[in-house]
Image: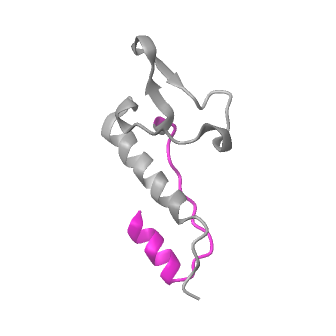
Amino acid sequence: TENVIRLCIEENVEHLVHCSTTEVTLMSYVRGGIFAVVIYQHESRIGLPEDENRLIMGAYAVSKLRAEKIVLGADGKLLAN
């Protein structure tokens, strides 16, 4: 993900579309149940989980969440030219 973003900046790519997964919103809550905050929500209100250990899909969800944070952190960066 970091390499893709770096190359987009170097090559003046104006738009990058990143597709994540709903698994980054699936967390266990009280009583060990599963709750998806994506239900009846939209992306601008959900936010990202702060504790990766609460993700129920394990390493897959953690890797997607980390990539999503990297992409969001690069939003608005100036291009090479």
As drawn, the residue found furthest toward the bottom would be 81
Q: Is residue 57 magenta?
A: no
Residue sitting at x 42%, y 10%: 31
Residue 11 lies in the magenta stretch: yes
Quadrant assignment for the N terminus = bottom left
Which quadrant of the structure image shows residue 54? top left
Name the residue rendered at 39%, 15% in the picture. Answer: 32
Q: Position of residue 49 (x, y in %)?
A: 48, 38
Q: How many numbered dots are placed on residues in this image?
A: 0
The image position of residue 34, as x and y in percent, is 46, 20
Q: Is residue 25 above or below residue 6?
A: above
Q: Which residues are magenta?
A: 1-23
Point out residue 10 in the picture as x, y percentages from the top left corner: 49, 83
- State the quadrant of the C terminus: bottom right
Q: Is residue 56 above or below residue 24?
A: above
Q: Residue at x 51, y 78 (%)?
A: 9
Question: In the image as oriented, which residue stretches furthest toward the top?
Answer: 31
Q: Is residue 5 left or right of residue 47?
A: left
